[in-house]
Amino acid sequence: MAACEQKATMPDTLPFQVAKAYGFENIDQVKSIAYTWNVQRDSVNVLSRNWKWNIKDSTVSYSGPDTTFTYSLTADSLPKQDGGFINDRYWAMMPFQLAWDKGYTFETSENATSPIKGIPSTKLTILYNSGEKGAPGMGYTPGDAYDLYVDENLMIVEWVFRRGNSAEGRPVTWETVESHGPLKFSTEHYNAEGKRTLWISDIKVE
């Protein structure tokens, strides 16, 4: 069973229900979200980027291995690190992006099984619109797809990211849910081999 609808016309769709499960209905109470995005590149090296997103004034503060600065999301020219901000925000806040983003369609499949742990799930496939990179509404990687495996509590248990809507992707778990202020975040992600490859830390919601 599959249904394909534009999110903007059906605010009580499954994507919005998932967003609400993570506290999206409380997002108006939030002034800023800070966190550290961490990825394990190999057995030794970890790359970390620190972010503070001031939602109310549309500014981002960045601290990484190369530099530290603050920039405005409404500026005519954005720094190269903004691509990292968007990437890391999807890892930290994908449930909220389901409500914020407009340029996608979705399909749902009941009675699905998550690919790594075999958890009974509803499969929610998100397909972002295709177009020219950087064009209005296209973002940095248009045409990407995400298969989200959602449990009975509307929480994401695993996802498969498929670049450019390719047939195959890499499954990753979504686990260790933490509450910060009125919001919830999945903070640890493991691959099919059971290795923690990416995690979110130092979360602060104001």
Image (cartoon, rainbow, N blue to C red):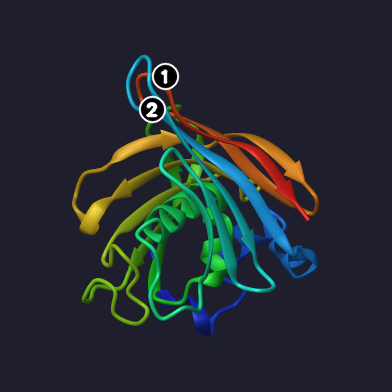
Q: Quadrant of the N terminus?
A: bottom left
> Image check: 82 left or right of 29?
left
Q: Residues within 10 Å of mark 1 (few under 14, many from 20)?
A: few
Could you tell me if the residues under marks 2 and 1 are in contact, i.e. CB atoms within 8 Å? yes
Cα separation between marks 2 and 1: 5 Å
Element type where label 2 sits in the image: loop
Examine the image and state in which quarter residue 53 appears: bottom right
Who is closer to the viewer here, 162 or 120?
Answer: 162
Residue 36 lies, in percent from the top left, at 57, 40
Can you give x and y, in whole percent of width and height, for residue 69 in the image? 52, 56
Q: Which residue is mark 2?
A: 191
Position of 200 relative to 52 (above/below): above
- From this view, report whether residue 45 is shown above or below residue 104: above
Amino acid type at circle 2 is Asn
Q: Amino acid at mark 1?
A: Gly
Q: Residue at x 22, y 76 (%)?
A: 131
